[in-house]
């Protein structure tokens, strides 16, 4: 009998088997048993067959074995699951039960949003429905009037009315007691306001008022602007158009005594014709004796302006003025000569009378022509003027075109003033021109008055404590020399006043009023401009 060798459990059979041995090979949770013979060959052994069939099932027709994954899949089917059916049956929604979220079905919500909610049918704010005749039921239509009932007066109406009816109170049918219409609200009769027919019968409100013709005519042009004088366009408002028209009119000369600027022109009338047409310089020159002296009127208030037709360049000229004063008939004979060259004007004076010389004669150019001006002197009886071109050979002609009563033009180009004449204008009783020293003359006054040339460079000391006013005159009335000083001492209340066109510059922090013992000096710094230096009543 062979000896059987037992071996331990092994993972797999060795490559070379020992004879007469038993091998326990691991298999799953158990072991497979193998027996070898004396030659080391595995031989049949009952234990091998029994162990091989353990855990096996019998094979039968129509049956098969499953894997673990197949068993897990079948194990996931819930109890009561739908039995197997065809694809058509499974897709048929009639066979489905339960619910499904709308958003999980593609396109369903967008399609439903385009539909009308059934809750909106036949209700207020919704849509009307149709009856069996495809008509909207009357219950869903607006209320309508199916009857009009007339009564003599409102008091004749039934106590309780009916909806859908109009109740007419005929009354007298007059404006004072007109026919009126009512409807039943369910509790009371409410009057139906009739159409006014025309706006004449409609009373205006407090805010939206009728724009009647009187209101249009009386409308204030609030916001009117005169800044633009451009042409009116179709896009302008009435207000802006008015502003443009007014601005354009402001640029025009008035019909009554127009004052033109620049070089206005006009047609020249024929010599010898009589009409109210404008006489141009060409017409005037054809009529005037160019060798005659031009005579002025009496007493020019604003000043004497002498215009000529002499160019201010490359001309040698001679100005002659002859006349006499009104009071003492003192004659005067003035000659001024000069020439213009290269933008400069030279002049000299001679032949001045010993009487009343012309004060402040100024030579200037306006629009390229020579002009002369001097302020009002005294009351002149009249004088004649001759301005000639002494450079051109031949007959001497008077270049004077006009003598005007006018203030000094503001647009003139000043080219010179005759200081030699101004020097002789000082009143010899008050001032020494040689030394330019005040003779300390004390001038007393007890009444309100206007300062005169006799006050120049003097000490004005009112001899009264009463309130008086001292007025500084315009240069055109009294031509004080620029630089003139007048000292004023107050014994009472003194008011310094400026004539029309004159400016008085009060001291810093002061006024033009003085009280007793205050002293100021008036200094002329411009044609109509004076500085007040000293102590005055505080502002």
Image: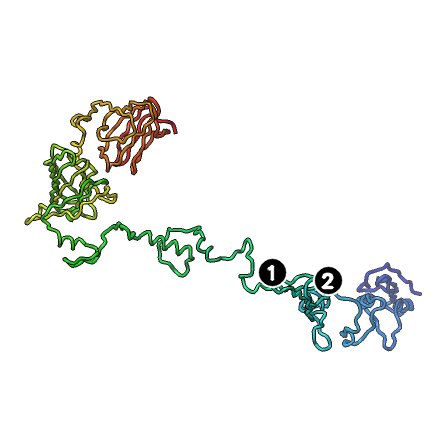
Q: How many marks?
A: 2
In the foreground, 483 or 305: 305
The extreme left residue here reads 394
From this viewpoint, is residue 267 visible?
Answer: yes
Q: Nearer the viewer, mark 2 or mark 1?
A: 1
Q: Quadrant of the C terminus?
A: top left
Q: Is residue 214 above or below residue 386?
A: below
In the foreground, 159 or 373: 159
Helix, strand or loop under label 1: loop
Residue 314 horizontal/vertical position (percent)? 13, 47
Helix, strand or loop under label 2: loop
Q: Which mark is residue 176?
A: 1
Q: Which mark is residue 272?
A: none
Question: Taking 267 as reference, is 220 left or right?
Answer: right
User: In the image, what residue occupies the spot 20% across and 23% down?
Assistant: 439
> Crowding at label 2, few (<14), some or many (≥20) Cα neighbours within 10 Å?
few
Residue that label 2 marks: 186
Q: Quadrant of the N terminus?
A: bottom right
């Amino acid at each position: 009998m062979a000896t059987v060798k037992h071996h331990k459990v092994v993972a797999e059979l060795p490559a070379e088997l020992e004879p007469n041995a038993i091998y326990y090979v691991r298999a799953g949770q158990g072991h497979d048993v193998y027996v070898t013979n004396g030659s080391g060959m595995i031989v049949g052994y009952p234990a091998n067959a029994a162990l091989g069939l353990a855990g096996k099932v019998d094979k039968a027709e129509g049956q098969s074995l499953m894997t673990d994954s197949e068993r897990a899949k079948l194990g996931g089917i819930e109890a009561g699951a739908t039995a197997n059916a065809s694809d058509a049956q499974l897709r048929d929604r009639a066979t489905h039960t339960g619910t499904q979220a709308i958003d999980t079905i593609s396109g369903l919500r967008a399609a439903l949003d385009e539909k009308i909610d059934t809750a909106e049918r036949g209700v207020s704010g919704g849509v009307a429905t149709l009856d069996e005749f495809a008509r909207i039921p009357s219950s869903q239509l607006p209320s309508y009037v199916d009857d009009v009932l007339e009564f003599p007066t409102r008091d004749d109406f039934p106590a309780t009315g009916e909806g859908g009816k109009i109740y007419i109170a005929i009354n007298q049918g007059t404006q004072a007691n007109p026919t009126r219409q009512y409807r039943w609200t369910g509790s009371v009769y409410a009057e139906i306001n009739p159409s006014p027919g025309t706006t004449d019968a409609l009373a205006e409100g407090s805010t939206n008022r009728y724009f009647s013709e009187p209101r249009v005519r009386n409308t204030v042009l609030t916001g009117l602007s005169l800044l633009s004088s451009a042409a009116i366009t179709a896009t302008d408002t009435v207000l802006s158009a008015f502003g443009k028209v007014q601005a354009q009119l402001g640029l025009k000369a008035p019909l009554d005594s127009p004052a033109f600027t620049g070089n206005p022109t006009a047609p020249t009338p024929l010599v010898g014709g009589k009409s109210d047409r404008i006489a141009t310089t060409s017409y005037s020159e054809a009529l005037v004796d160019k060798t005659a002296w031009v005579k002025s009127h009496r007493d020019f208030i604003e000043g004497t302006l002498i215009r000529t037709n002499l160019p201010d360049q490359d001309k040698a000229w001679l100005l002659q003025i002859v006349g006499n004063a009104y009071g003492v008939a003192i004659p005067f004979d003035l000659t001024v000569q000069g020439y213009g060259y290269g933008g400069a004007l030279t002049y000299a004076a001679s032949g001045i009378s010993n009487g009343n010389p012309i004060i402040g004669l100024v030579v200037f150019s306006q629009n390229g022509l020579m002009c002369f001006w001097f302020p009002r002197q005294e009351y002149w009886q009249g004088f004649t003027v001759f301005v000639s071109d002494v450079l051109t050979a031949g007959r001497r002609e008077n270049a004077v075109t006009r003598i005007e009563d006018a203030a000094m033009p503001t647009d003139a180009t000043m080219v010179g003033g005759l200081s030699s004449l101004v020097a002789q204008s000082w009143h010899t009783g008050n001032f020494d021109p040689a030394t330019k020293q005040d003779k300390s003359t004390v001038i007393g006054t007890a009444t309100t008055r206007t300062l005169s040339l006799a006050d120049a460079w003097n000490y004005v000391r009112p001899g009264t404590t009463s309130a008086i006013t001292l007025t500084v005159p315009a240069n055109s009335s009294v031509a004080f020399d620029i630089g003139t000083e007048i000292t004023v001492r107050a014994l009472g209340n003194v008011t310094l006043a400026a004539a029309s066109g004159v400016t008085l510059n009060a001291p810093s922090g002061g006024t033009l009023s003085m009280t007793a013992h205050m002293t100021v000096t008036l200094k002329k710094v411009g044609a109509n401009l004076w500085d007040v230096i000293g102590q005055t009543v505080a502002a």
